[in-house]
C-alpha cells in the first residue's frame, strides 16, 4: 500500500511522502485505500431490536434527559453511527427508529473515508446490500431504480453524514449529545492505545447513561472502566456507568453481578479463540443458574456451559444441562436440541443427531445452522434431495443468524464460511 501511494505522488522517498501526508487530499486518498466498508442493511438485527425494545424506552423515560432540542421542539432519539462506511448502518438505524414510532429520531453518521461518505449521501444501493431487508420494508423506504435501490427523502433527511476521524480529538464534536453509539467492527482495526482513546471519546459523546453497541468480536475489557456490560436475550452491549438507571435483566430476580458479567464476556472471548477448556474453567466461576432456569441471563449461562461441556467430552453433563432447557420451547429449546445433537454425534449416533437437529429446526424454523446440519447429515444418509433442500434453506437463514449462534454452533467457522458451504452444497456439491 505504501509503495502504491509513493508512486501515486511521484516519489520514492518516504520522508517526502510524510510531508505530503499532512495534506487533506492525501489523507483522504490513504483513508480510501486502507478502510474496508463491507456491510449491508439491518446487519445483526438483534442490536436493532435491543435498541428499540430495551434501550430507548429506558433512555426516553429518564428524568435527566433533555426534553427539547436547540430548536425548542421535542428531542427525539439521537444515535451516532461511528465508522458508518457507505451508510447502510446509518440508514438501517433510521428505518428501525421510524418503524418503532420515533419520527423525530436523528442519526449522525461519521467516517474518515470521503469516497464512502459520497456513496452514503447518494443513498443508492445494490440488491446485495438489501439482501436481508423484508420486501415490505424496502417498499416503504426505498425506491427501486433498475438494479439499484434509492433511499427516499424522509430517510435521507433523518441522517447527517459527516467526515470525522475517530482517532483524532475534536472537542466540538465529542461532547454529550447521543443516546446510543453504534461502532461495530471498527475498533478491532486500531492499536490498543488508540482503541482506549476512541472509547473515551464515545464516553464523552454519550448523554449520562447512554449505550454503546460493538461488533460481536469486540470487547471493552482492558480498555475502559467507564462502561458496564449489559445483556438482553443473549445480546450483549454496554452502558455508560455513571448513572444508576439501567434496563432490568430479569423481572423478579436479582440480575447478575458485574463480576459475573465480566467473567461471561471472558468466556465468549475464549470460545472465539477456541480455547474451550479455559472457557469452561471461567464459566464455573459464575453463580450457578437458578433451577428451573427462567431468566435470559440464566438461560445463556446454562446453554453456554452445556456447549463447553460437550466440547470437553463431558457428554453426560452437557446432556443434563441441555435437557433442563427443553421445556422452555421456542429458540431456547432449539438451542438445547442443538447441544443434544452435538452430543449424539460425538457418540457416533448420526440418526440421533439428525433427529435432534430436526427438532431444533421445528422449534425455531429460523435456525439456519440447524438446517445446515440437517443438510450435512441427510447427505451422509444418502438423502441427496433432502440435503440440497436443507442447504438451500440454510443459505437464506444464515444471513440473519445471530452472532451468538454462529459462535456456539458454527463449528469454529464464521458466517461467510458457513454460507459458502451451503451455497456449494445446494448446487449439488459433496461434503
Image (cartoon, grey):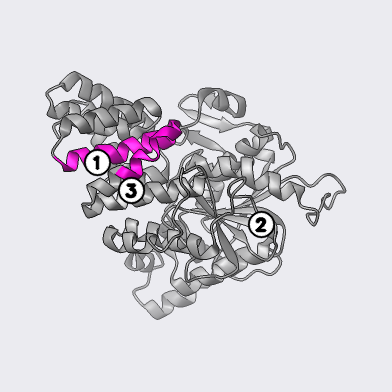
The residue lying toward the viewer, choosing from 326 and 187, is 326
Q: Nearer the viewer, mark 2 or mark 1?
A: 1
Q: What's the mark number on residue 306? A: 3
In magenta segment, residue 329: yes
Residue 55 horizontal/vertical position (percent) = 64, 47
Residue 16 horizontal/vertical position (percent) = 42, 78
> Residue 272 vs residue 286: left or right?
left
Q: Secondary structure at mark 2?
A: strand
Q: CA distance from mark 2 to mark 1?
A: 40 Å
Residue 241 horizontal/vertical position (percent) = 64, 64
Magenta stretch, main secondary structure class: helix
Q: Secondary structure at mark 3?
A: helix
Residue that appears at 37% across and 69% down: 6
The residue lying toward the viewer, choosing from 28 and 229, is 229
Q: Secondary structure at mark 1?
A: helix
Q: Which residues are magenta?
A: 320-347
Q: In this figure, which residue is indicated by the disc labeled 2?
A: 210
Residue 20 visible in this rendered orientation of the protein: no
Neighbor class of circle 1 (other Cα within 10 Å; few <14, some 14-19, many 20+) is: many
Please tell me which of labels 1 and 3 falls first in the chain: 3
Q: CA distance from mark 2 to mark 3?
A: 33 Å
Q: What's the mark number on residue 342? A: 1
Amino acid at each position: 500500500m505504501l509503495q502504491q501511494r509513493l508512486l501515486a505522488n511521484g516519489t520514492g522517498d518516504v520522508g517526502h511522502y510524510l510531508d505530503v501526508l499532512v495534506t487533506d487530499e492525501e489523507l483522504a486518498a490513504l483513508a480510501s485505500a486502507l478502510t474496508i466498508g463491507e456491510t449491508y442493511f439491518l446487519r445483526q438485527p438483534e442490536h436493532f431490536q435491543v435498541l428499540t425494545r430495551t434501550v430507548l424506552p429506558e433512555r426516553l423515560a429518564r428524568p435527566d434527559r433533555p426534553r427539547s432540542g436547540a430548536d425548542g421542539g421535542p428531542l427525539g432519539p439521537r444515535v451516532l453511527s461511528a465508522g458508518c462506511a457507505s451508510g447502510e448502518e446509518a440508514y438501517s438505524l433510521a428505518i428501525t427508529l421510524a418503524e418503532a414510532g420515533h419520527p423525530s429520531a436523528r442519526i449522525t453518521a461519521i467516517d474518515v473515508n470521503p469516497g464512502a461518505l459520497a456513496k452514503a449521501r447518494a443513498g443508492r444501493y445494490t440488491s446485495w446490500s438489501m439482501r436481508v431487508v423484508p420486501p415490505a420494508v424496502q417498499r416503504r423506504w426505498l425506491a427501486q431504480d433498475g438494479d439499484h435501490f434509492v433511499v427516499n427523502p424522509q430517510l435521507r433527511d433523518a441522517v447527517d453524514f459527516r467526515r470525522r476521524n475517530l482517532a483524532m480529538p475534536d472537542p466540538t464534536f465529542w461532547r454529550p449529545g447521543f443516546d446510543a453509539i453504534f461502532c461495530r467492527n471498527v475498533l478491532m482495526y486500531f492499536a490498543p492505545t488508540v482503541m482506549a482513546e476512541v472509547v473515551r471519546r464515545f464516553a464523552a459523546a454519550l448523554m449520562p447513561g447512554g449505550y454503546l453497541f460493538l461488533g460481536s468480536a469486540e470487547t471493552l475489557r482492558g480498555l475502559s472502566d467507564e462502561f458496564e456490560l449489559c445483556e438482553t436475550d443473549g445480546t450483549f452491549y454496554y452502558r455508560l456507568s455513571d448513572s444508576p438507571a439501567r434496563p432490568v435483566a430479569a423481572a423478579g430476580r436479582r440480575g447478575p453481578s458485574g463480576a459475573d458479567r465480566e467473567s461471561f464476556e471472558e468466556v465468549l472471548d475464549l470460545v472465539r479463540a477456541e480455547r474451550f477448556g479455559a472457557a469452561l474453567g471461567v464459566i464455573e466461576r459464575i453463580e450457578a443458574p437458578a433451577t428451573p432456569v427462567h431468566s435470559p441471563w440464566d438461560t445463556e449461562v446454562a446453554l453456554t456451559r452445556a456447549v463447553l461441556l460437550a466440547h470437553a467430552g463431558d457428554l453426560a453433563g452437557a446432556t443434563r444441562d441441555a435437557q433442563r432447557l427443553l421445556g422452555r420451547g421456542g429458540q431456547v429449546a432449539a438451542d438445547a436440541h442443538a447441544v443434544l445433537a452435538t452430543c449424539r454425534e460425538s457418540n457416533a449416533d448420526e440418526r440421533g443427531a439428525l433427529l435432534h437437529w430436526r427438532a431444533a429446526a421445528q422449534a425455531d424454523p429460523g435456525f439456519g445452522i440447524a438446517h445446515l446440519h440437517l443438510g450435512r447429515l441427510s447427505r451422509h444418509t444418502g438423502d441427496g434431495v433432502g440435503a440440497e433442500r436443507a442447504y438451500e434453506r440454510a443459505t437464506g437463514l444464515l444471513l440473519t443468524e445471530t452472532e451468538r449462534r454462529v459462535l456456539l454452533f458454527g463449528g469454529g467457522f464464521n458466517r461467510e464460511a458457513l454460507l459458502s458451504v451451503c451455497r456449494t452444497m445446494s448446487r449439488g456439491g459433496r461434503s
